[in-house]
Amino acid sequence: MSMLFPEVQVAPPGPRAREIIALDRQYASPSYIKEYPLVVDRGEGPWVYDVDGNRFLDFMAGIAVASTGHAHPHVVSAIKSAAERFLHICGTDFYYDSFAQICARLASYLPAMGPKKVFLTNSGTEAVEGALKLARHHTRRQYVVAFKGGFHGRTYGAISLNSSKVAQRAFFGPLLPGILHIPYANPYRSEGGGDEASHPARLLEKEYFVNHVDPREVAAIFVEPILGEGGYVVPPVGFLEELRRICDEHGILLVFDEVQSGIGRTGKMFAAEHFGVMPDILLSAKGIASGMPLGAIVAKESVMSWPRGSHGSTYGGNPVCCAAALATLDVVEGLLDQVRETGDYLQAGLRALKARHPVIGDVRGVGLMVGAEFVKPGTLEPASAYVGELEQLAFQKGVLLLSCGKSTIRFAPPLVVGKHEVDVLLGVLEACLVELDARHWAAGKV
Ligand code: PLP
């Protein structure tokens, strides 16, 4: 493919985009966020075209989902041929090849977990929900540990585990009881591990298990091996190991929510591989089928002990989604080296930007799961307004970005991007920072 660049000839939203946005605003739920007025017509690889003919470089992949890029021919052809054969029969009640194949394929990753069983869902939050049920069912225990800053989805179990944005929980209560939230280990902010006493593992053992709940009643610890919505935080070495040790000591299940960090995003199929710590239950979704709705609960065979009829789903593991997932995994398995290389190149470029723009407080990540945290220069105070404006300005200049946490830009592009796309991104980013630095420091605000 020839080298492409962003091309914004009609300031978005253009006339066609405005019509669609007006219709959407009239009828679609007001709960939708709609970060900026991008109205998509089509996509190709890491490029997205809007309905007014503008071309954007996608560095957010529809929230880390379009793993193989937009409209990857191998994935599209698998979807077409599956759709031509049958759209639905219900994998909970009957059999088909792609369902069995995707379960087998997912069970083949993380061999150190040992033999596994797989349950297929339609989304990440359903995988979380199912895992909560499985953990309670298997252990016959009721309490669950989750992390501050964590995000696991929008259904009741998931929002009960969440602790990243209060709007996701406000006025929806009562939520699921029995969830204990402890701090995530954040090296940049010296939280949860900055000193030994505040280490999450110590808090659990010395405080929670002494004052709040008997560990024999704890079913599971749900953790994102790399924090996603909470700010793309990579925990320090030892964090996950300690959780594994505590789980082993007390018969608690360790659940890795790899909905965002899995499927090659970090340059390995799952982030767990970077840390060398294996969970008892692994959750996947997002990038797994390039955007077709599929999620998975992958559990140790000994843990997925629930009997026939105890859990099911009408659509989960739909044949078109299974075909898309098998094709996606073919593509992603071949991209892992490139993901690591491009990710390192991206981080080096962002660090160079950080040296020139002190509003970037921290650059971190693994593979193409990279975050840049923006702070009021010389402090740890989040530069939230700056980040909001940066998203909008980058969009106007033809780059699609998405924030997370309080003031972090996440770089989660389709895994097919290479150095050229990173160079384009860095060029646009620098142009935005120059403009925003002038706007903010001149006005004396952040
Ligand atoms: N878990 C994590 C770590 C996520 O990042 C998300 C979505 O952002 C979810 C679960 C929920 O997935 P879904 O939106 O597919 O329900």
Image (tube, helix red, strand yellow):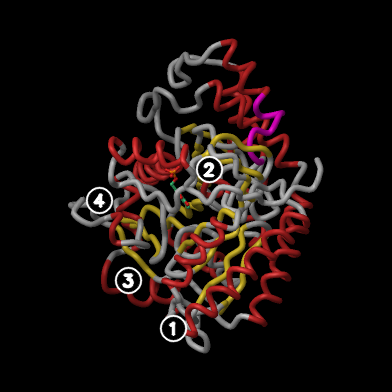
Question: Ligand 1: does it lie within 8 Å of the C-beta at label 2?
Answer: yes
Query: If you read the primary sequence from the N terminus, does the residue marked by circle 2 or circle 4 appear first?
Result: 4
Distance Cα–Cα, label 3 vs label 1:
46 Å
Q: Which mark is residue 286?
A: 2
Residue 329: image quadrant is top right
Residue annotated with mark 3: 208
Question: Residue 142: percent from the left, percent from the top?
Answer: 29, 51
Helix, strand or loop status at disc 2: helix
Residue 443 — which label?
A: 1
- Residue, x 18% and y 54% (percent of image)? 171
Part of the protein shown in magenta: 69-76
The local secondary structure at tag 1 comes to helix
Tell whether position 74 is magenta.
yes
Earlier residue among tags 3 and 4: 4
Q: The residue under label 3 is which amino acid type?
A: Tyr
- How crowded pointer 4 is (Cα within 10 Å; few <14, some 14-19, many 20+) is rated as few
Looking at this view, is 420 or 165 the one in front? 420
State which quarter of the image contains the N terminus. top right
Label 2 or label 4, whichever lies nearer to me, is: 2
Which amino acid does the dot numbered 4 rest on? Leu
The picture places residue 253, in percent across and down from the top left corner, at 45, 52
Q: Position of residue 225 (x, y in %)?
A: 54, 59
